[in-house]
Image (tube, rainbow, N blue to C red):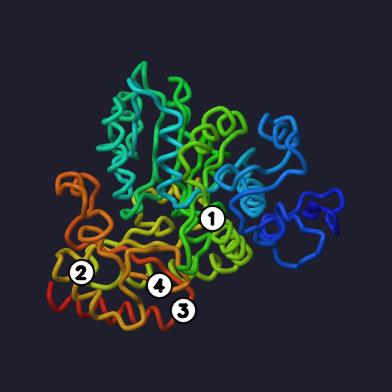
Amino acid sequence: MEDSSSSRGAGDTTPSLDTMLVRGGLRRSEFGETSEAIFLTSGFVYESAAAADARFAGDEPGYVYSRYANPTLSVLEQRLAQVEGAEACHVTASGMAAVFTSLFCHLRAGDHVVASRALFGSCYVILDTILPRYGIETTFVDGPDLEAWEEAMRPNTRAVFLETPANPTLELVDIGAVAAIAHANGAKVFVDNVFATPLGQRPLELGADVVAYSATKHIDGQGRCLGGAVLADAEFCNEHFMPYYRHTGPALSPFNAWVLMKGLETLAVRLEREVASAQALAEMAENHPAARSVRYPFLPSHPQYELARRQMKNGGTLVALDLGTKEAAFAFMDALRIVDISNNLGDTRTLATHPMTTTHRAMSEEARRSMGIGDGLVRLSVGLEGRDDLLNDVARALDAARRVS
């Protein structure tokens, strides 16, 4: 295959982020196709037994099995690495595969993790329930409390894990400050950057060591397929991630990799509109009497507004509404006519979620409360619908919530 990602028009200049989303890592076969080819194959053949021997020994470049690597996956990985500014990237079958694999390949029995308390439900279960089975303990802290991060560190702390903005409360963590604390104690920093996307926040530039994504969300952005990605330096990927990845099998399918590449091509233009609509929706909801509080990073009322402006390039596409009670939350969601009820996010369609009864249901009530997930919390993921249509739909639903609160 020919690498044509920088063969035309770029000269000696570095392509812009928008250009890399479309052309990063592009390789064409001998047929000169416009759209990337899909190599829908599980295995590969060799010209001779000696060639197979050399390739498995690592003495000859090439592919051996799609569980290890695949040409379609390689293009997606190179593109994501260029967009993120990472040395290396590996894609996985889902976002949770990315989170679990990146942590588990690094940790050993007897290790300790410090994590922000406000997390996606499955991330919390990994840290609170699954890793302890293998002798790996986690201490949860309030993400904004830097003293709590400092106090939680131990001699055996090998990783810190955080989401910022957090799911679903949109609480923020100062990545740079936590990274300084972690590195001073010899720990690596793992950041789930799914809410912000690589266009809204750059964790590696802020001091993170490993970044994970659910590519199912904004990267696909159209509700079509699952996928995940892990980005880090070459040493972490080669020494820790790949040996685990090759033998445990969390690989992404070539078809899903191709779909995600198509999603990347429109990510910038989708996010621009979705972010603007989210900001407008948050501002409208904040002034409605049914909303006890509204969380959106770029609202001045957000308790970490200054951090958001310093750390993020935009406020993102998620808005959190506290309507007070479960009855008010359900009345709000049932009154929606354009917005869909779904547990997903990052879609072209605007989606409403009640985290307590869906995405964070597996957690104990105590754990949910400690994260700030109350009965009346609703998470909105803002899509591409007409802005006025969205504002009218949400305002009408807020009126319905007010009548039962």
Q: Secondary structure at mark 2?
A: helix
Checking the image for residue 350, the label placed there is: 4
The amino acid type found where label 1 is placed reads Ser
Q: Dot 2, how many residues are within 10 Å of its Cα: few (below 14), some (14-19), or many (20+)?
A: many
Q: Are marks 3 and 4 in contact (CB under 8 Å)?
A: yes
Q: Which residue is mark 1?
A: 253
Q: Which residue is mark 3?
A: 385
Using the numbered discs, state the Cα–Cα distance from disc 2 to disc 4 in whole angstroms.
16 Å
Separation of marks 3 and 2 at Cα, in angstroms: 22 Å
Name the residue at 31% across, 33% down.
131
Q: Tell me which label, 3 or 1, sits earlier in the chain.
A: 1
Marks 1 & 2, CB-CB < 8 Å contact: no
Amino acid under disc 3:
Glu
Residue type, mark 4 in image:
Thr
- Label 4 secondary element: loop
Pair 1/2: label in front = 1
Q: Which mark is first along the chain, 4 or 3?
A: 4
Left or right of 227, for residue 339: left
* Helix, strand or loop for disc 3: loop
Q: Earlier in the sequence, mark 3 or mark 2?
A: 2
Residue under circle 2?
329
Q: CA distance from mark 4 to mark 1?
A: 27 Å
Q: Is residue 95 above or below residue 225?
A: above
Residue that appears at 77% across and 43% down: 47
> Which kind of residue does numbered mark 2 sit on?
Ala
